[in-house]
Image (cartoon, rainbow, N blue to C red):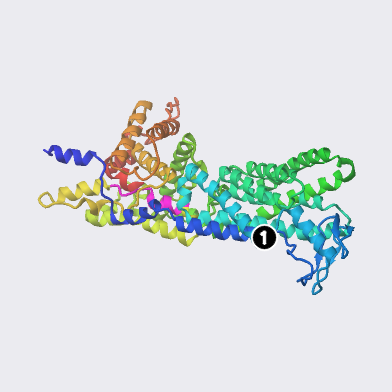
């Protein structure tokens, strides 16, 4: 009889982690503050340089480094040589000072007036001040991210992606503005009209697609503030950019097709029209320039959708992010890994499809990504195609290759499908979210069947339990944990002789409790409430799978047997002590 200490140690979660898990889990607890601070400073310096007005700070007698033109029509008053007041009118686009020539009193006065309107004094001080303000905005954004998504603070790839998207959005917008100002000059259009055609909303749409809407909301606010500096005389432009960015981000939440980006562009155009009409009505210019402004708004929406459509695959590949669009493509049965599974291990393929149904329902019940859960389930056992005949779902009733192997060798073959599956997924360049599910869907759980068999064959000496455990790591995310639970529940459900709703519920609860007590769920954020919702969703799906079928009178087939008498079922019942650990 086991001692009380032995019983306690078996039931309570283990406090020590395998070396692999301790090593992999360490970076999660260490926040890369230095990287975040350095990246924030570099990004702020870049943005300040891009957004600072290009008019140099020059005084009378200085040499103009380049041609300086007026950004708008100005009326300037300045002192002449004999201290008399002089007035000058400068048209937009007019050359104020030519490159290589000295600055006159008139040119110096015009340059000073431009600096006053744009809100800068000395350029070096202005650059430092603008950098400081942007750093302050980033700090507030970082505090929000730490509260809302603390894991993101330690994800270097996504932090770099956010900074990159912010800088690129501003650069593309500024470049588009420069090109469109030349076009506006050619057609004598107002410079303010150009502002409506800038693809500022593309950044927010990409953040919503690649990360989530909450981050896109904060991103939209920051970009709108920064772009407002480009149009200091019109505070409504910040409101325009914010509303269009939010609309663009909203319409790509749970985006199922790449064509959805085009629809999001259409909705962005619609919001642009409403905002432009409101702005022009406020300024009393709807009749005079409303048609041109609406055309610019439509052009901006088209550019936004085009940029997102073209660049999204690039960001998915470079930053290794599984968007819903990418996940839908991976569900295609013609994907190489899924086709190989169908041909080499059809039993595993069917097993994975059922787990996909279970995992998707469970993820939806606790507000996780159901598409990621389904796709992760499809690929979680892809490593079994290397040795399909060693897994029970692919074996014939009259043959079991493990009968000729020692328990330790069988355990080694069973556990190898995790490593081989992860390597196959990496070779096919599957997203890291899918690879993580493959590696974590068994955690470091015990292969009970072969462990017990080894103890029976070696009753005297001790059998190392660690030799019969999966290498891990344990699930790090809720979705990976859901796949683990669905895998175990589906495998155990095959042993049910009479699958009534009560027996299904009892089975589901016992499997989830066993995994919980084995300390497999301590590295993810699943709560007891989540486990209860997951159990309910599993019961619903399994009741649908095992629903009662009546016997039709007069429709009998030779050799037909009851479910409990079927040899497949008997075989499963005999092998099931291992099924919950090695067949999934």
From the viewer's side, name the closer residue of 80 and 559. 80
442 inside magenta stretch: yes
* Secondary-structure class at tag 1: helix
Residue 9 location (% of width, % of height):
20, 41
In the image, 260: left or right of 281?
Answer: left
Going 23% across and 38% down the picture, which residue do you hit? 11
Going 73% across and 40% down the picture, which residue do you hit? 271
Going 20% across and 48% down the picture, which residue do you hit? 453
From the viewer's side, name the closer residue of 114 and 436. 114
Residue 43 location (% of width, % of height):
58, 58
Q: Main secondary structure of the magenta part?
A: helix
Dot 1: within a 10 Å radius of its alpha carbon, few (fewer than 14), some, or many (20 or more) residues? some
Residue 454 location (% of width, % of height):
19, 50
Residue 411 location (% of width, % of height):
27, 54
304 inside magenta stretch: no
Label 1, on which residue?
50
From the viewer's side, name the closer residue of 406 and 364. 364
Where on the picture, by quarter, is residue 26?
bottom left
- Quadrant containing the N terminus in the rendered view: top left
Q: Can residue 524 be seen in this view?
A: yes
In the image, 574: left or right of 494?
Answer: left
Going 79% across and 61% down the picture, which residue do you hit? 111
Vertical order, 119 against 498 (above or below): below
Which residues, given as a range, are shown in magenta?
433-445
In the image, 444: left or right of 454?
Answer: right
């Amino acid at each position: 009889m086991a001692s009380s200490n032995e019983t306690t140690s078996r039931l309570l979660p283990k406090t020590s982690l395998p070396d692999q898990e301790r090593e992999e889990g360490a970076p999660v607890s260490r926040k890369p503050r230095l990287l975040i601070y350095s990246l924030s400073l570099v990004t702020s310096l870049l943005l300040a340089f891009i957004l600072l007005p290009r008019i140099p700070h020059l005084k009378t007698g200085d040499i103009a480094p380049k041609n300086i033109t007026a950004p708008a029509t100005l009326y300037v008053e300045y002192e002449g040589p004999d201290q008399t007041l002089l007035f000058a009118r400068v048209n937009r686009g007019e050359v104020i000072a030519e490159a290589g020539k000295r600055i006159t009193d008139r040119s110096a006065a015009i340059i000073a007036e431009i600096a006053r309107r744009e809100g800068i004094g000395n350029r070096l001080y202005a650059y430092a001040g603008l950098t400081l303000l942007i750093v302050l905005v980033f700090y507030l954004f970082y505090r929000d991210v730490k509260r809302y998504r603390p894991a993101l603070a330690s994800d270097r790839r996504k932090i770099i992606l956010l900074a990159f998207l912010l800088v690129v959005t501003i650069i593309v917008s500024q470049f588009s503005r420069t090109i469109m100002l030349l076009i506006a000059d050619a057609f004598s259009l107002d410079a303010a009209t150009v502002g409506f055609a800038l693809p500022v909303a593309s950044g927010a749409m990409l953040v919503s697609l690649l990360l989530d809407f909450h981050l896109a909301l904060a991103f939209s606010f920051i970009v709108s503030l920064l772009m407002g500096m480009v149009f200091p005389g019109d505070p409504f432009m910040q409101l325009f950019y914010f509303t269009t960015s939010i609309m663009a981000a909203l319409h790509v939440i749970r985006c199922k097709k790449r064509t959805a980006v085009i629809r999001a562009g259409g909705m962005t155009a619609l919001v642009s029209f409403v905002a432009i009409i409101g702005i022009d009505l406020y300024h009393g210019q709807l009749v005079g320039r409303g048609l041109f402004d609406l055309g610019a708004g439509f052009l901006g929406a088209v550019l936004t959708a085009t940029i997102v459509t073209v660049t999204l695959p690039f960001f998915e590949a470079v930053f290794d992010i599984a968007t819903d669009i990418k996940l839908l493509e991976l569900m295609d049965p013609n994907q190489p890994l899924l086709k190989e599974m169908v041909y080499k291990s059809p039993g595993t393929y069917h097993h994975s499809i059922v787990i996909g149904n279970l995992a998707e329902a469970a993820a939806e019940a606790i507000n996780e990504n159901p598409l990621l859960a389904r796709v992760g389930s499809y690929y979680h056992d892809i490593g079994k195609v290397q040795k399909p005949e060693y897994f029970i779902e692919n074996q014939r009733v009259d043959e079991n290759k493990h009968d000729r192997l020692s328990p330790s060798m069988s355990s080694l073959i069973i556990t190898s499908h995790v490593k081989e599956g992860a390597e196959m997924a990496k070779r096919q360049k599957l997203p890291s979210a899918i690879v993580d599910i493959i590696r974590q869907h068994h955690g470091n759980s015990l292969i009970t069947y072969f462990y017990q068999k080894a103890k029976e064959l070696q009753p005297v000496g001790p059998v190392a339990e660690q030799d019969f455990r999966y290498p891990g790591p344990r699930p790090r995310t809720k979705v990976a944990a859901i796949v683990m639970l669905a895998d175990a529940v589906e495998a155990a459900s095959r042993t049910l002789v009479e699958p009534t709703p009560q027996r299904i519920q009892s089975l589901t609860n016992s499997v989830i409790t066993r995994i919980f007590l084995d300390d497999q769920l301590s590295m993810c954020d699943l709560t007891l409430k989540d486990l209860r919702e997951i159990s309910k969703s599993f019961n619903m799906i399994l009741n649908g799978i095992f629903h009662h079928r009546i016997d039709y009178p007069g429709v009998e087939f030779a050799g037909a047997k009851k479910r409990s008498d079927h040899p497949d079922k008997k075989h499963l019942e005999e092998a099931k002590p291992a099924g919950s650990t090695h067949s999934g």
